[in-house]
Image (cartoon, rainbow, N blue to C red):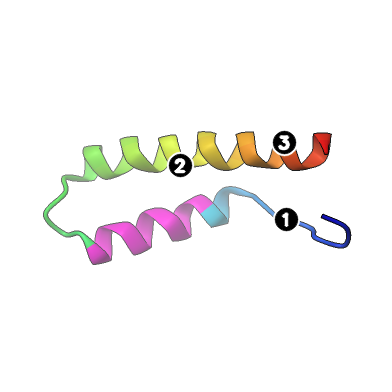
Amino acid sequence: MVGMEIIFDSRNIDEIFSGFTKSHPAYSKEEAMRLSDKWEEQILLIMRFLDWK
């Protein structure tokens, strides 16, 4: 993907976590943090794949 730059830092994960907790208030904070960590892992894997291509 030429010209596509992904900027990823802790603010992105904070935004994901914040958006998730607002959209799904029934989840406990611990469960939301666990899911947020999984999303971070997936995003990093995608970034590694895009860098490899």
Relative horizontal placement of residue 21, taking residue 3 as reference (left or right): left
Locate the N terminus by quadrant.
Answer: bottom right
Point out the residue furthest to the left here: 26
Is label 3 in a helix, a strand or a loop? helix
Rendered view: 6 above or below 35: below
- Residue 49's label in the rendered image is 3
Relative horizontal placement of residue 6, taking residue 40 as reference (left or right): right
Relative horizontal placement of residue 22, taking residue 10 as reference (left or right): left
- Residue drawn at (43%, 56%), measured in percent from left and top? 16
Distance Cα–Cα, label 3 vs label 1 = 12 Å
Q: Give the range drawn in magenta.
A: 13-23
Locate the C terminus by quadrant.
Answer: top right
Q: Earlier in the sequence, mark 1 or mark 2?
A: 1
Q: Is mark 2 in CB contact (under 8 Å) with mark 3? A: no
Residue 27 falls within the magenta-colored stretch? no
Residue type of the residue flagged with mark 3: Phe
Q: Is mark 1 in CB contact (under 8 Å) with mark 2? A: no
Q: Where is residue 19 in the image (x, y as percent from the top left)?
A: 36, 63
Q: Where is residue 17 in the image (x, y as percent from the top left)?
A: 38, 53
Crowding at dot 2, Cα within 10 Å, few <14 / some 14-19 / many 20+, comes out as some
Q: Mark 1 points at which residue?
A: 6
Distance Cα–Cα, label 2 vs label 3 = 15 Å
- Residue 39's label in the rendered image is 2
